[in-house]
Image: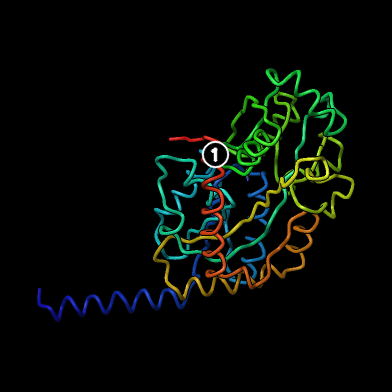
Amino acid sequence: MSLYKILGGFALAVAAATAAAQQYPTKPITVVVPFTAGGPTDTVTRSLAAAMGKQLGQSVVVENVGGAGGTVGAARVKNAAPDGYTLLLHHIGMSTAPALYRKLQFNPLTDFETVGLVVDVPMTLIARSDFPAANFNEFLKYAKDNKAKMNLANAGIGSASHLCGLLFMSSVQTDFTTVPFKGTSDAMNALLGKQVDFLCDQTTNTTGQIQAGAVKVYGVTSAKRVASLPNVPTLQEDGLKGFEVGVWHGVYAPKGTPKAVIDKLVAAMQAAMKDPDFAKRMADLGATVYGPDKANPAAHSAHLKAEIDKWAPIIKAAGQYAD
Ligand code: ASP
């Protein structure tokens, strides 16, 4: 083949990709949630997907790909076509996975395009409704004598519930048996069914159960109390100095997704985050929605990098690894 033909073919392919990016989206978009349906990440994603769909004029469909603390779903998006039709909504786990997994299937910093930060969600320490401790002090007292028979549920190594559990165990200097699920919707079901004893989970999954009195609650992981749960103390008020975890969430696309597509997604996401239905749902569930200063690729990338650097030494000190 002549050089002219090769160059001509290349130019045609570039023109076609540019045209596709300009017309984007012409079909439904899939957003992968790397945890099970009905859980906290799923709840945030379905709300955002509905609001973004209105902006983009296409449906945004949620696909749940749970497993290995969110790393299976993230790897699936890494390997998807970089055309804007497969996205990922993941949380703080994107920044802790590199320190936790020896054989991680992706590099959060180099295998994805960041689209923007979405929400920051506090966590709550909760127990089954018949757990024999009315407050945090009683919880600690009970745990001292009964730790061998207490089970702490989580959504697998790399999940926010796992991270919170690790920090909690190191704060109270007690090890508990952990029980992993593919998402905290399953962990919550096990807690409601009294098959596990306690769980640290995001308010986007726990608010309704706490308000209904279906679980016991001992504290929130934010620096201040959460407006939708005014009677729940912070874990810092409970005496755990410096105990603070905010589960930030962001949207990602596979590396190489055209800039024109990312720009459209950023605009749609920023507009969706101002949608009254989305804003109200997030506020009711204790989540703080980021402003446009954070809901953009540059701020998201900087935050991701800073969080990877922040968590690596803490996780190393906790001595937790997975393959
Ligand atoms: N966010 C996860 C979920 O949606 C749970 C977690 O990270 O702990 O199930």
Q: Is residue 292 above or below residue 143?
A: below
Q: In the drawing, does residue 119 fall left or right of residue 256? A: right
Residue at screen point 69% across, 36% down: 171
Image location (x, y in percent) of residue 273: 68, 67
Query: Which x, y percent locates residue 209?
Result: 80, 40
Between 172 and 285, the one lying in front of the other is 172
Q: The disc labelled 1 sits on which kind of residue? A: Ala
- Identify which residue, 148 or 198, lies in the foreground: 148
Q: Quadrant of the N terminus?
A: bottom left
Q: Residue furthest right?
A: 231
313 or 22: nearer the viewer? 313
Q: Residue at x 54, y 59 (%)?
A: 306
Q: Ligand 1 is in which quadrant of the figure?
A: top right
Q: How is the image coloured?
A: rainbow
> Looking at the picture, how far across and down is residue 269, in whole percent?
61, 68
Which residue position holds label 1?
317
SS at badge 1: helix
Q: Along the line of sight, which residue is nearer the eye, 223 or 253?
A: 223
| Left-right relation of 10 to 90 | left
